[in-house]
Image: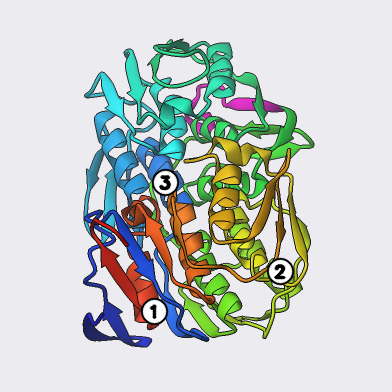
Amino acid sequence: MDGGRHAGPEGPVITSTIGVTNGNMDRCRIFPKGPLVGRTRVVGSKSLTIRALEASALARGSSVIAQPADCDDVDVFVRALRDLGITIDPGDELSIEGSSGQLSPKAEVIDLGPAGTPFRFAMGLAALGNGPITLDGTERMRERPVGPLTDALRALGARVDYLGIDGYPPVRVSASGNLGDAVTIHAGESSQYLSALLLIGPVLPRGLRIELSGSLASAPYVELTLEVMRAFGAESSRDAGSFYVPPTGYRGARYVVPGDASSAAYFFAAAAITGGDVTVLGLGDLSAQGDFGLLEVLETMGCRVERGTGEVRVIGPDRLHGLDVDLNAMPDQVPTVAVLAAVAEGTTRIRNVAHLRLKESDRLEAVATGLRAAGIEATVLEDGLRIKGGHPERAEIDTRDDHRMVMAFSVLSLHSEPMTIWQPGCVSKSFRRFFDCLEGLGVEIESLPGGVS
């Protein structure tokens, strides 16, 4: 279909009119296009925006967050911070009045929807407040664990009560007014537990020493946390399995959010799967976000990658090659690599990502089910997936209302057969403009508001 056109800095851009991103559709069909060629620009990093919001909220003085991510998870966290007493002025740039670590909540119940990172970060923030705060979310959020973080907050002196099943939301957090300065955390399920503690460390009276127990999932996200803390004047040190955050507090700052590596990954993959040539702009430091590791995976699979200042060009090969890869450091890219593996020569083995069962969906089972629906042999293993490359067939994909499933299988649709994608509107959780960007690269997307496809 045709949308309106306007001239942008990278040339003509198609403005989507299909209604996918505002959640008005049950399904959409995405058609193969042949080699995808063009340039696009992605939104600011969701992970960095959320971390910058928390540091700003706890800082002395005012802050400005420029180029923030435009997505549901950020909106949810902004509302939660307002409920916790923080003044945030909306706009293209977010203006935040810091609390100097002294929160004065305005609500007794905060609904964080399906947003895992905001929920866990809000648990740490609620422990700084001055009264009981109940945190709740969607039914799926009630199935996502928070036990290790609960145990850590209790050890620091906060009272945390489960209001449903032990280890899961909803929870009621009651601040003690005098949190301790040392704790042990198990972060093998999620690095968000560790990040939630690190972020409140600078405003605790004696700082915070954190000992890790066991492995750490998604370690690059902890590096993002520490990077944002430094940007707002908070230092930290680490020694093997421990972290120390001194009680320096945060200073208000202007923070410019770089483009999101997780969002850019789908356009890198689109070039790879179609044998195309796509450049993604506005990315910032390519070493900072763990999901830029996908570029090395793409090179191993046969792509040519050109890294520039704040931009990346990916040129796809005639045929991708399967590989054996540990994706623990970038679990959000498991669905992306899986759909590339579906068309690659040979068999691909994805390892060390058992914790993907605890995301917005059980992503291991969801990915395998979607690939099998398209005629691709896919097996769920104890810690990952095994996928035998083939030729995807036309299929309907139940994405389980999971944004990463929608975007990954949209990429698969570009290879050879159109795919019908269920629940496309959930991309707004992390990347509202995803379908706009696809259409801007010339991809045909058909709306299917109901009935038989």
Q: Is residue 48 visible?
A: no
Label at residue 296: 2
Q: Which residue does the image show at 35% across and 29% down from the upper left?
A: 137
Circles 3, 2 touching at the beta carbon (< 8 Å): no
Report the Cα–Cα distance between label 3 and label 2.
Answer: 27 Å
Q: Which residue does the image show at 40% across and 39% down from the upper left?
A: 115
Q: Which residue does the image show at 52% across and 45% down from the upper left?
A: 229
Q: Where residue 118 sits in the image (x, y, percent)?
A: 41, 37
Task: Indicate which disc, 2 or 1, sits on the residue closer to the N terminus.
Answer: 2
Give left or right: position of 227 versus 388. left
- Give the residue pinned by disc 1: 443
Task: Label 3: state its secondary structure.
Answer: helix
Give left or right: position of 2 versus 255. left
Identity, as a three-letter code, of the amino acid under mark 1: Val
Q: Which residue does the image show at 53% across and 63% down from the upper left?
A: 261
174 above or below 326? above
Q: Where residue 286 sits in the image (x, y, percent)?
A: 60, 68
Quadrant of the frame with the N terminus: bottom left
For the record, the magenta segment spans 201-212
Outermost residue, front side: 452
Task: Label 2: state its secondary structure.
Answer: helix
Identity, as a three-letter code, of the amino acid under mark 2: Glu
46 above or below 4? above
Q: Is residue 139 visible?
A: yes
Label at residue 50: 3
- Nearest the viewer among 427 and 42 is 427
Foreground tag (2 vs 1): 1
Label at residue 19: none
Report the Cα–Cα distance between label 2 and label 1.
Answer: 26 Å
Q: Where residue 320 sits in the image (x, y, percent)?
A: 70, 76
